[in-house]
Image (tube, rainbow, N blue to C red):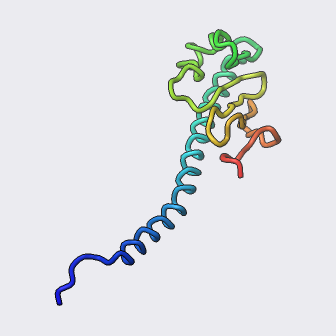
Amino acid sequence: MDKRGFTLLEILLVVVIIGILAGLAIPKFNKTIESAKGKEAYVILETIRTAERMYYLDYGAYSNASAQTPDTWDQLVPDYLLENPNLRQNRNWDYYASGVTCSAVRLGGAYDNYRIGIYINGDMLTTLPYCWPWPPN
């Protein structure tokens, strides 16, 4: 007797195995995506920090760039930054520069309103409400 095809049991077994593998892979994938978003914010914070230091050298004071008042970024854009990071499309963070710290607040997702920040000397802010390393556990 020539048997062709798969039995229902074999197909169900394959579906269960694929489901288990997907269940293990999807959370890891989501954490990797969130980690990349955190690194994006870190790079932009480093750029803002450098711009703030240059601004301080020129004017003897730090700017007061805020996400709530977009015109305050005019102090840094275009002489020190190419663009206001809060005006980018599809952004994941709101950015602030206030004196000796620069910070980013997460927009949406599982970590909505979580923060990361950086001191003007380059050290990361690690005390609450700031979370580093990113993503928080």
Q: Count how many numbered circles sit on residues in the image.
A: 0
* Residue 29 vertical placement versus 110 (above, below): below
Which quadrant of the view contains residue 44? top right
Which quadrant of the view contains residue 72? top right
* Residue 134 vertical placement versus 14 (above, below): above
Q: Residue, x 35% and y 75% (percent of image)? A: 8
Residue 89: percent from the left, percent from the top?
50, 24
Residue 133: percent from the left, percent from the top?
69, 48
- 24 sits to left or right of 113: left
Q: Residue, x 54% and y 18% (percent of image)? A: 83
- Give the quarter of the figure containing the N terminus: bottom left
Q: Is 99 or 36 nearer to us in this picture?
A: 36
Residue 3: percent from the left, percent from the top?
21, 84
| Furthest residue in direction bottom, as rendered | 1
Q: Residue, x 71% and y 34% (percent of image)? A: 113
Q: Is 113 or 76 nearer to us in this picture?
A: 113
Which quadrant of the view contains residue 70? top right
Residue 132: percent from the left, percent from the top?
72, 45
- 6 sits to left or right of 90: left
Q: Residue, x 68% and y 31% (percent of image)? A: 104
| Furthest residue in direction right, as rendered | 127
Q: Is 136 or 118 nearer to us in this picture?
A: 136
